[in-house]
Image: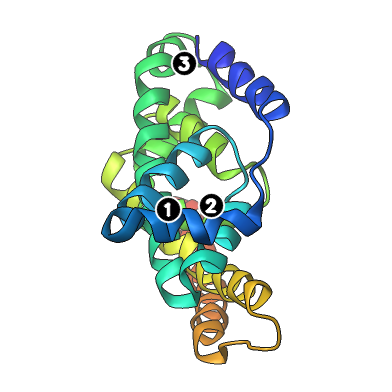
């Protein structure tokens, strides 16, 4: 059922016409005070439907500006991570738990032991889209709170960066460097976190010997 759901999302994305980006700011303005909540919910639904997070974040920045757009994009990422994890856990966990053996069982145990740093590392690796990773984590024995926290932290650097780019596209000639700065700091922090996590894992593996 999970595979069929993902296939249905893929077919839908191919068949449904794309909205005109120029119309999005006017649509958000017509929603008034409900626009932020609608942006978070719609963004989350797009992410669980396997729309790339880059597109969602760029659109949020173009509509709401660099800082607000990044905040709403992160809200959408958090909600999408929770929805994807829940669907994967509901539709795929029993199937995976009853069939993993050998190395796959060790891998499943690794996901179950993961901390926030482990989730950040997997999120930053270019192995799959945001939605697919969320579904995949749900099928493992991973814990939900570290998964959600790691997902948001890993999404923060690119959220600020892409939202700033989206805002600059909608307003040519103006780039808010104060909005881009958190992205650079986030990337540096991500590298440090991955390095520390890698060293901790290496020491843990060498410990028994």
Cα–Cα gap, marks 2 and 3:
21 Å
Q: Are marks 1 and 3 in contact (CB under 8 Å)?
A: no
**Residue 56 in view in this figure:** yes
Q: Please tell me which of labels 1 and 2 falls first in the chain.
A: 2
- Viewer-nearest of labels 1 and 3? 1
- Determine whether label 1 and label 2 are within 8 Å by CB: yes
Does residue 109 appear left or right of residue 145 in this picture? right
Q: Is residue 153 above or below residue 187?
A: above
Q: Quadrant of residue 95?
A: top left
Question: Residue 131 at x, y = what percent?
Answer: 53, 38
Seen at 58% across and 15% down, the residue is 3
Examine the rendered structure and indicate whether residue 59 appears above or below residue 104. Answer: below
Depicted 204 relative to depicted 176: above or below: above
Q: Which residue is mark 3?
A: 96
Crowdedness near tag 3: few (<14), some (14–19) or many (≥20) residues, C-alpha within 10 Å:
some
Neighbours of disc 1 within 10 Å: few (<14), some (14-19), many (20+): many
Q: Position of residue 176 (x, y in %)?
A: 56, 88
Which residue is at the front of the view, 2 or 190?
2
Q: Nearer the viewer, residue 125 or 197?
A: 125
Q: Which residue is mark 1?
A: 151
Q: CA distance from mark 1 to mark 3?
A: 22 Å
Quarter of the image holding residue 92?
top left
Instruction: Say what secondary structure mark 2 lies in.
Output: helix
Residue wearing tag 2: 123
Of the two numbered discs 2 and 3 on the same chain, state the one appearing first in sequence.
3
For disc 2, the neighbor class at 10 Å (few under 14, some 14 to 19, many from 20) is many
Q: Mark 3 or mark 1, which is nearer the start of the sequence?
A: 3
Label 3 sits on a secondary structure element that is helix
For the residues carrying marks 2 and 3, which lies nearer the camera in this image? Answer: 2
């Amino acid at each position: 059922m999970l595979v069929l759901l993902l296939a249905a999302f893929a077919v839908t994305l191919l068949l449904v016409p794309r909205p005109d980006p120029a119309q999005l700011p006017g649509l958000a303005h017509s929603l008034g005070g409900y626009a932020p909540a609608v942006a978070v919910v719609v963004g989350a639904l797009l992410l669980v439907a396997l729309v790339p997070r880059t597109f969602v974040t760029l659109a949020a920045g173009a509509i709401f500006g660099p800082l607000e757009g990044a905040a709403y994009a992160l809200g959408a990422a958090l909600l999408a991570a929770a929805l994807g994890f829940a669907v994967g856990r509901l539709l795929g966990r029993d199937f995976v738990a009853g069939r993993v053996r050998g190395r796959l069982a060790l891998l499943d145990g690794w996901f179950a032991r993961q901390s926030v740093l482990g989730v950040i590392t997997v999120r930053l690796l270019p192995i799959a889209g945001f939605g697919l990773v969320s579904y995949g984590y749900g099928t493992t024995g991973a814990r939900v709170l570290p998964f959600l926290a790691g997902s948001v932290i890993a999404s923060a650097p690119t959220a600020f960066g892409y939202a700033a780019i989206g805002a600059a596209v909608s307003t040519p000639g103006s780039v808010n460097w104060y909005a881009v700065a958190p992205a650079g700091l986030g990337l540096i922090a991500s590298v440090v976190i991955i390095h520390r996590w890698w060293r901790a894992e290496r020491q843990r593996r060498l410990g028994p010997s």
